[in-house]
Image (cartoon, helix red, strand yellow):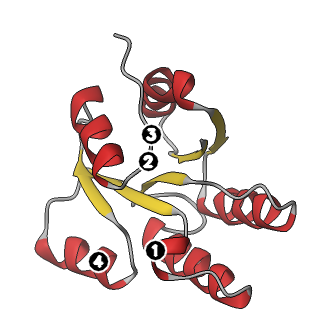
Amino acid sequence: MKILIVEDDVSGVLLLKRYLQDQGETVIAMDGVKAVAAFLEARDSHRPFDLICLDIMLPHLGGQEVLKRIRSLEDEVGIGGSTGCKVILLTALRDVESITLSFRNQREAHLSKPISKERLFREIRMLGLPVTDDA
């Protein structure tokens, strides 16, 4: 599995990397612009991401806009619906508007921070992606 972790908080990056390091190749982007660039590079090299863990509050380009751009980039090459990458939106925000907007932007799952390994792995499994939990 190829995973993109998009998080601007160093402790959040380290935590997610620790949780996901045994699940496949992980790539880190610490802002929204770098996330879109990483997605485009992976898509164009024919090694797309299977999973994106995307923080909603990011510098330079917010998570909601990153998600819209990713879905648009997938549409450009005929990827969509269940064939696109799976996106788990991660947020400290708990307002209904943010959650509703992320759903409209086609995220598959939503987790409120703090993120636990158990909750994260449960969501990944629900998305139909393989997870091995040796811990």
Instruction: Give the quadrant of residue 101.
Output: bottom left
Q: Is residue 94 left or right of residue 90?
A: left
Residue sitting at 68 percent across and 81 percent down?
73
The amino acid on which the numbered mark 4 sits, given as a three-letter code, is Phe
Instruction: Decide which of tag 4 and tag 2 comes sooner along the chain.
Output: 4
Residue furthest to the top: 135
Residue that carries the numbered disc 1 in the rendered image: 82
The residue carrying pointer 2 sits among few (fewer than 14), some (14 to 19) or many (20 or more) residues within 10 Å by Cα, namely: few
Residue that carries the numbered disc 3 in the rendered image: 130
Q: Position of residue 82 (x, y in %)?
A: 46, 74
Please name which of the two marks, 4 or 2, marks the residue nearer to the observer.
Answer: 2
Task: Estimate the spatial distance between the alpha carbons at disc 4 and disc 3, rounded to whole Å.
Answer: 23 Å
The amino acid on which the numbered mark 3 sits, given as a three-letter code, is Pro
> Looking at this view, is 130 or 2 the one in front?
130
C-beta proximity under 8 Å, tags 3 and 2:
yes
C-beta proximity under 8 Å, tags 2 and 1:
no
Q: Is residue 62 above or below residue 71?
A: above
Callout 4 secondary element: helix
Instruction: Decide which of tag 4 and tag 3 comes sooner along the chain.
Output: 4
Instruction: Decide which of tag 4 and tag 1 comes sooner along the chain.
Output: 1
Please name which of the two marks, 4 or 3, marks the residue nearer to the observer.
Answer: 3
Q: Position of residue 58 (x, y in %)?
A: 49, 57
The amino acid on which the numbered mark 2 sits, given as a three-letter code, is Leu
Q: On the rendered image, what quadrant is the N terminus found in? A: top right
Residue that carries the numbered disc 2 in the rendered image: 129
Residue sitting at 50 percent across and 32 percent down?
13
Residue that carries the numbered disc 4 in the rendered image: 103
Task: Estimate the spatial distance between the alpha carbons at disc 2 and disc 1, rounded to whole Å.
Answer: 12 Å
